Amino acid sequence: MPVKNQFKPISRENLKWRVVGIVVLAVFSLLVVFPSYGNKGIDWVNKKANLGLPNLPASGFNLGLDLQGGAHLIYQANTEIIPDSDKADAVEGVRDVIERRVRGGLGVSEPLVQTTKVNNDYRVIVELPGVTDVNQAIKMIGETPILEFKEEDNEPLRPLTAAEKKEMDDFNAQAQKKAKEALAAIKDGMSFADAAAKYSEEEKTKDNGGVIGLIDNLVFPDIYKWAGAHKDGDVSAELVKSFDGLNIVQRISSQPGIPPAPASTTIYSIARIFIQTKQPVDIVPPSEQWKSSGLSGTQLKRAEVSQDSQTSQVQVALQFNDEGTQLFADLTTRSVGKPIAIFLDGTAISIPVVNEPILNGSAVISGSFSLQDARLLAQRLNSGALPVPVELIGQQKVGATLGADSMQKSLKAGVYGLIAILLYMILYYRLPGIMAALALCIYTLLTLALFKTINVTLTLSGMAGFILSIGMAVDANVLIFERLKEELRDGRGLKSAVEEAFIRAWPSIRDSNITTLISCVFMVWMGTGFVRGFAVTLAIGVLVSMFSAIVLTRTMLRAALLLKKKDEANVLFLGYKKKVEAVVAK
Amino acid sequence: MMNIPFIKYSKLLLTVSAVITVVCLVFLAVWGLKPGIDFTGGSLLELSFTNRPETVEIQNVFDGLGLKNTSIQKVGDYGIIVRTNFLTEEEHQRVLSGMQTKFRASDNQVHEESFQTIGASISSQLKSKAAYAIIFVLLGIIVYVAYAFRKVSRPVASWKYGVLAIVALFHDVLLVMGVFAVLGRYYGVEVDTAFVVAILTVLGYSVNDTIVVYDRIRENLQRHGGDNFVDVVNMGLNQTLMRSINTTFKTLLPLIALFFIGGASIHYFVLALLIGIASGAYSSIFIASPLLVVVYNWQERHRA
């Protein structure tokens, strides 16, 4: 390492600006660290001068869980069932779900939920500041709700017995007969409305002429097909079958489609006389009302609250993944006009009716939701979409009182340590010691301000790292001042001795800090909370300390020397006495 | 100017240091370090009582729940720390409610101060990461020291400076480990990730002193030439002596404050740092430099 052995003179003007710079830096750091004092000052100025200055942001330090109390949970995601290529995504999905649950369900405002991959294990780390009821948190996170999409079960529980079959056939024959009668009555001149009132079995419509309103091709495809082949005013000459029975249909009017039917299609206003028929399921009910469609939360990508662009009604929008899109397309194609049910943990939470086949994998659940209900539903749907089960493999919980106690103790230790160092420096190194002490105070403020601005999370170990760095920060000054002592003893003039000391001490300062930084790098790599907290604050401390020793102390010492007229050391400098002795010895 | 003839006593100094190192090695070999739950997996539960019951009574609650391998340690006037196997959340809750039913009374509140549980997969991962971190830091330091001394090759080759600095480091680390082997044996002090952090910090910091002393010796060699190597080394030692003492002492000051008032949870972490950093100053003066002379003398003999 070549040591540049030259004395760089610095102009008075330049030095003045550097001193100003240091003062500004110190004041700025002070305000960042203690904004409340700054704000008091600003308030005072505003009161006196009415300048309307804005207050400083009064944010506190970002405290770790061990200082403010809280819970740290480590989950292992069971990704065995998932193909390798999807694992990372699935775990990210878990992360999102957990974050939503702790934000929404627990009301933790600033949870930290991260994923890490250790060898081949995927983990989710959950940090819940301020949460002490960990049990509830764990319950909320750990539960794996099951989201299922079900369709109506139209399969009878068992084949009909002969007697039941006969019963059904008899019933349907009766219905057929009755329908034929109605058809004949209309042919004989009975008005459609009268026939409806007399024969229709649809209670809702029989007394208003059988009018069921506008239909498209979804709910009554057979009736729609018939209407397409006839004119307004026509009445069907034959019986038209629908999924629920027999119909005599009248097309009242036609018009272009209105949503949800596309405008390019025609829709019809229809009246019908309805005669019920029976299916096997009407006689032997299905085992359950709903049967699984194969579509579940594992195929849901996300659910979110949206608004119908036309009615501005609140609805919940669903988006499926590729597999889910296909399943959902099949399901909706075969369930047109029928309800499907969305089950969460075995309970139907919503039973929308399918209006048309949905092929793009997105769906909305509409209904008379309030915004809050819709949010809740979306949230619950998202919870249902937990793609992989998780297992709690580690936890750490610190009570708030213990955290506050640790905080106070380490603060106290830090303050005592700082004071001890300041006294030692001043007593041992005299004037340069005062400069170093001042620089150390600025160092402390500057480092704390840096922690705040770059949002370093202060943990107990981080406090220890910072406190250790205060001790290390003086090392550079000690190196410099020991050099200064020697240079003075060698009989150098004061100013050149000061410059020389700084230059000669630099390689040692650099070398010794680099090894500490090497350690810090690998500690950060180790990665657990305690280790990282310590290493980050220590590393920042070491970096700032180099700046503090070289820039702050040097500038302050230079400035102090300007006040001295003679370029000779005096009792304020260590090494002075020896020089006198040396002169005497000569 | 003060001139202590360190090198004159180098045989004595090195013998003492070697004995200390060997004793530490023996402690480590015989007793070993007591691994904490970070490395073995398990749970650590800290409870406080307004009126602390007898340890036996608390032990009974755990036995009643069928939890084995439980050890209970008193902390302060009101607290206990329980070490046990990995607890699932249900077991943890059962322990807590067991404590409440047994001990809660009008004059006794039971409060959970902290709880930590670590599963086997985490602990094995921590173990391997800790081992790798130590190896990487050592390698990093060796490479850096060799690099920093690359221009000094006479009369002792630069890589030898690096090796000797590492020898001094081994002494520091072994001393810390030896002390913790004793503490583990007699006071049940466990070694956790915090301990590894302390070791890594000592590795990074203690080598500083050695580097500074060697730096100075190197500078003296450039100034005065290598004619009388022993004198040059001794001069370097004396020149940097006050610096070594001052920097180390000032780094120890805040650590001493932390040790006494920083709270129980980082007590032994700080102790490991204190021992390691103090030892770092000792080893750079009493081991690294005398060894340099030993190496020099050995070279001279073999050249002759």
Image: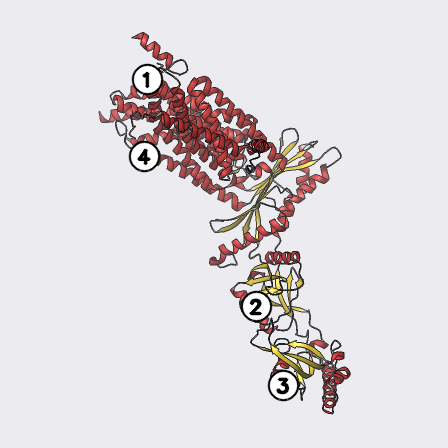
Q: Which of marks 3 and 2 is nearer the N terminus?
A: 3
Location of mark 1 (residue) = A493
Q: Distance between the residues labelled 1 and 3?
A: 116 Å
Crowding at dot 3, Cα within 10 Å, few <14 / some 14-19 / many 20+, comes out as: some
* Image position of A135 (left or right of B176): right
Colouring of the image:
secondary structure
Chain of the residue displaying label 1: A
Q: Going 50% across and 36% down the picture, which residue do you hit?
A: A451
Q: In this view, does B19 lie above or below A144?
A: above
Q: Along the line of sight, which residue is nearer the eye, A341 or A433?
A: A433
- Please determine whether, in this image, residue A372 is positioned above or below residue A342: above
Secondary element at image label 4? helix
Q: Residue furthest right?
A: A198
**Quadrant of the frame with the N terminus of chain A:** top left
Place residue B8 in its image quadrant. top left
Q: What residue type is labelled 1?
A: Gly
- For disc 2, the neighbor class at 10 Å (few under 14, some 14 to 19, many from 20) is many
Looking at the image, is mark 4 or mark 3 nearer the viewer?
A: 3
| Disc with the residue nearer the chain's start (1 vs 2) | 2
Q: How crowded is mark 4: few (under 14 residues within 10 Å), some or many (20 or more)?
A: few
Q: What residue type is labelled 2?
A: Phe
Marks 4, 1 in one chain: no
User: At which x and y percent is residue A195?
Assistant: 75, 85
**Which residue position is annotated with label 4?**
B147
Image coordinates of residue B219 in percent, x first then y, are 30, 25
Q: Residue B12 carries which label?
A: none
**Residue where numbered disc 2 is placed:** A328
